[in-house]
């Protein structure tokens, strides 16, 4: 089954890449361990995927869409249906980056069999190449189960947003010796289970560096360390679309301000009848 972008450019604003590129593969990501840092951003829509595709090695259809797109209080309410719909859109909007989809809360924790059914559905319905799931050593058997059945997995340790009700907040992890040891153990367990990369989120920097040195697969940092094998951010955060910026985010633009200014200009022109002008209306045929 082909999952190449097939939008009708005569009617769609979302124009496909003019020169399709070969997609990045899971083995290619694994080989980047210790090499050129991997670039990963979240994407939830066709157009954002198109705009980011060429510059990114991986596009993550994150369950952060629950907050970014739907205004939910956390990622916990996100459903498999949401992830499948947005995952398909991102695949349609990209040619180059490897597309990874988050497994939403409740879709994989009960058993490896449940995880396989959920992951298989996501890959079948979207054309994505891999899934990501949260959890450390406790989820290693599930990662191994999926990997042995042809489903590539990215692990996610440290600050795991789906466990916010247990963690009690979004603070950094690894400030105690016990937590330090657990984080390293979680990373090693994920690595040995066959994860082809591990997201390390909200972890005290020296521990993130230690984890990166302890595992054979690439680590993808978010609020961790520049010494990780790659980095990921929520695109809307780094583009400045929200007023609140997490500590670990660098704002590369202020799109919220620019959009607000553009809308204010539009509103003023509408109210003063400047828009639409001669160039935006249709004249009678001669």
Image (cartoon, rainbow, N blue to C red):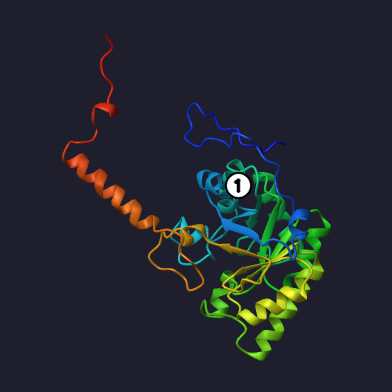
Determine the image quadrant of residue 286.
top left
Q: Which residue is mark 1?
A: 54
Residue 10 located left or right of residue 37: left
Q: Which residue does the image show at 56% across and 60% down from the upper left?
A: 63
Q: Which residue does the image show at 42% across and 60% down from the upper left?
A: 240
Residue 151 in view here: no
Where disc 1 sits, the SS reads: loop
- Residue placed furthest toward the top: 286
Determine the image quadrant of residue 94.
top right
Establish if 15 lies above or below 245: above
Q: Position of residue 23 (x, y in %)?
A: 70, 45
Q: Quadrant of the N terminus?
A: top right
Determine the image quadrant of residue 145.
bottom right
196 or 106, which lies in front? 196
Residue 3 located left or right of residue 164: right
- Residue placed furthest toward the right: 148
Q: Position of residue 142 (x, y in %)?
A: 76, 66
Residue 257 located left or right of residue 232: left
Establish if 167 lies above or below 226: below
């Amino acid at each position: 089954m082909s999952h190449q972008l097939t939008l009708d450019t005569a009617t769609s604003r979302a124009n496909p890449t003019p020169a399709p590129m070969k997609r990045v593969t899971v083995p290619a990501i694994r080989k980047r361990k210790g090499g050129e840092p991997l670039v990963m951003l979240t994407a939830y829509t066709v157009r954002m995927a198109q705009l980011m595709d060429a510059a990114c090695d991986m596009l993550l259809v994150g369950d952060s869409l629950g907050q970014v797109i739907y205004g939910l209080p956390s990622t916990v309410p996100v459903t498999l249906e949401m992830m499948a719909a947005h995952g398909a859109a991102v695949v349609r909007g990209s040619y180059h980056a490897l597309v990874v989809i988050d497994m939403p809360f409740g879709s994989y924790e009960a058993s490896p069999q449940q995880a396989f059914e959920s992951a298989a559905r996501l890959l079948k319905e979207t054309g994505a190449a891999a899934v990501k799931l949260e959890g450390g050593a406790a989820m290693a058997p599930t990662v191994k189960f999926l990997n042995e059945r042809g489903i590539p997995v990215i692990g996610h340790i440290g600050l795991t947003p789906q466990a916010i009700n247990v963690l009690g907040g979004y603070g950094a992890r690894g400030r105690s010796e016990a937590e330090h040891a657990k984080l390293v153990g979680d990373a090693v367990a994920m690595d040995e289970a066959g994860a082809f990369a591990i997201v390390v989120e909200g972890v005290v920097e020296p521990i993130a560096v230690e984890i990166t040195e302890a595992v054979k697969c690439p680590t993808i940092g978010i609020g961790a360390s520049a010494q990780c094998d790659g980095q990921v951010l929520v695109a809307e955060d780094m583009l400045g679309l929200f007023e609140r910026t997490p500590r670990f985010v660098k704002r590369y633009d202020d799109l919220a301000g620019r959009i607000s200014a553009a809308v204010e200009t539009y509103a003023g022109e509408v109210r003063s009848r400047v828009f639409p002008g001669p160039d935006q209306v249709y004249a009678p045929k001669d």
